[in-house]
Amino acid sequence: MRKMNLMRTVCVAVCVTLFCCMLTACGSVETKPGETVACAAFSGEAGKSYTLTGPLTLDFSQDPAAAATFNRIALEYELTAPVRCVILYTSAEGEERSEEFYLSETQTSFSQLIDGYLEGAQAKQLKSITVEPLLAGECTLQLKAAALAVQEVLPEVLTIENDHYILGVDLSMGGGISMLEDKKSPRDDIENLLNNHDTGRLIQQSYYGVQSHEDYENGSYNGTVWPYNPVQGGDLHNNCSKIVAVECTDTTITVVSRPLDWALNNTPTFAYYSNTYTMMDELVRVDNTVLDFSGFPNPSHTQELPAFYTISALGSFVHYGGSDPWTGGELSYARDLGFWSGNPDGYFNLSPDNTETWCAWVDENDYGVGLYTPNVELLVAGRYKYNGDTRSRANPTNYVAPVAYLALKPYTPISYSYLLGAGTVEQLRASFAANKDFADNADLRQTMDERFDYADIHFESEEDLAFFGASNQTELTYENGAAVLTATQTKGADPYIALRYADNATELYAQEYPYMVMTYRTAPENSESADITELFLSADVVRSATGGYSTLHYLKDDGELHSDIIYLGEKDFWHGRINEIRLDYFSLAEEGDTLYLYSMTLAKDEKQAQKLAKSQLAAAQEWLGE
């Protein structure tokens, strides 16, 4: 990773040369897949609509305005469906280069800085743009305006400031936040409150998607097969995500980035992240949007909103965990947290009635940095190699992520906002309380299609695999009426997959469903240890898998079909709204061990459970032709 330039720079105008023409609509031109058509869009001579059923290449070789020096291309358009585009251009050195971008029908404008922008790269001739629909059927594209520009090369770390803060945004790492300096800090030994040790250590957007898909090849991280994971800063190899666009004023910075896939090596994802950073009097506001073009059936997952890293010196975690928010109730402190991954002590469930969802990392005098994301469900926090270091580049760090369960839905923008601040706990709480209604973050609450009924989970087609959410060390496939769960690795945590009951169209309550019926069979070639399932039961204030809130069930590992009745009502914590059941389908397993799951159904009493067990077993036998 390149050395960061921490100079404090005031934003200035970014465009020094601009070639732009508005286009006049001339009716739609029917095109054939693979066709190339001459286009003079940058001269405004051929503003047309194009109807596509396959790839179309717009040739600008005869457009005089396309023979211009530029490092940024901008388009205004209308679309009826999402498309993938590839631009072909000649670099300033005379080399032919190509770059990819995506356009959405939910937007009407797009701009992209060329590769190497931060190093001063420029182009001298735009040759063509190839447009390809991402979905089946016709797609209509109308170009309304086109521009080539030379944008000023901004410093790698772009800063804005007011009387309270200096905020630093690292353009070399996808535009994530790398610096927050508190001008009113009581500590002279701290300049930057944030950790920026590597591409993963920023305040940044990061989302988890599909675990397995025929069009996706997983990477591995810490010995675990990793899901699709666009990370704003870059990947685990310290490759940096690309800045696509950047604009700034004295009080705001807006960036758009194309994140890399965390567990792969220098591999761009299909997503775009946008962030707008705005200086307020006592706080910093951050507005975020993600738009993913992967087309993957990304499941509901615990999402970091955002990922947040501080210097080690702020070693105590504080939040409000009660159910009477914004009334000055007692705060909870965790002063000796360990590493957050898989650590139940680092999971702080939030009551559904608790809207006071801010948190902070502070020192022994209650001074530190705070974060407030409305409409989240829990907080995950912890410390890594704690040593009290005040350096932002040090390896030790503290982490927190406000978490909600949501799916990264393809072609659909998801937006949310959060606030940052520094000061004492009392000051932070007062500032957040004064701005508690600044955003509702409505996009963080998703519900499933009404045809998915979590009280009666069965798998009639591959589409029904959408019942599942987050998974670990698991390959999920479909076969003859069954969800096929295969352990891909067994190093570290157990293989598991989650069923996100809170996504149900109507709320389900544990006390109404004391029984569960599970219809399954194990693979005959499984290892001898693959015979115990652990169900983590999350209901009421327990929002996700938590130690001490589970039940064990012994599987019949003879390779035959079985419908087992599991009594959940004996657990005193099984009450309130059902949020999630995490199925650790083999507590002990070897790679390749497989469970065929045909159904998981909730029952209101023992008689109904026995009736369901018979009917579901018969249904599974029918699938297998028995």
Image (cartoon, grey):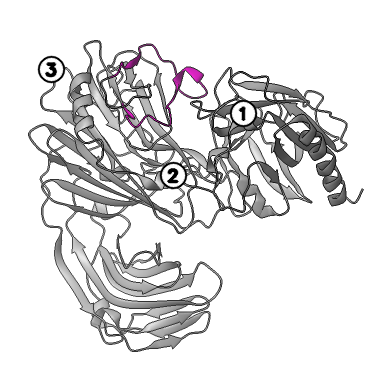
Which is the main secondary structure of the residues drawn in magenta? Answer: loop
Give the side of residue 236 with respect to residue 46, left or right. right
Residue on which disc 3 sits: 186
Residue 609 x, y percent position in the rendering: 77, 34
Residue 66 x, y percent position in the rendering: 27, 77
Q: Nearer the viewer, residue 155 or 47?
A: 47
Q: Amino acid at mark 3?
A: Pro
Q: Earlier in the sequence, mark 1 or mark 2?
A: 2
Q: Nearer the viewer, mark 3 or mark 2?
A: 2
Residue bounds of the magenta highlight: 329-358
Residue 521 x, y percent position in the rendering: 82, 37
Q: Is residue 5 visible?
A: no
Residue on which disc 2 sits: 445
Residue on which disc 1 sits: 511
Q: Is residue 511 above or below residue 571?
A: below
- C-alpha distance separating marks 1 and 3: 51 Å
Q: Nearer the viewer, residue 502 or 202?
A: 502
Q: Nearer the viewer, mark 1 or mark 3?
A: 1
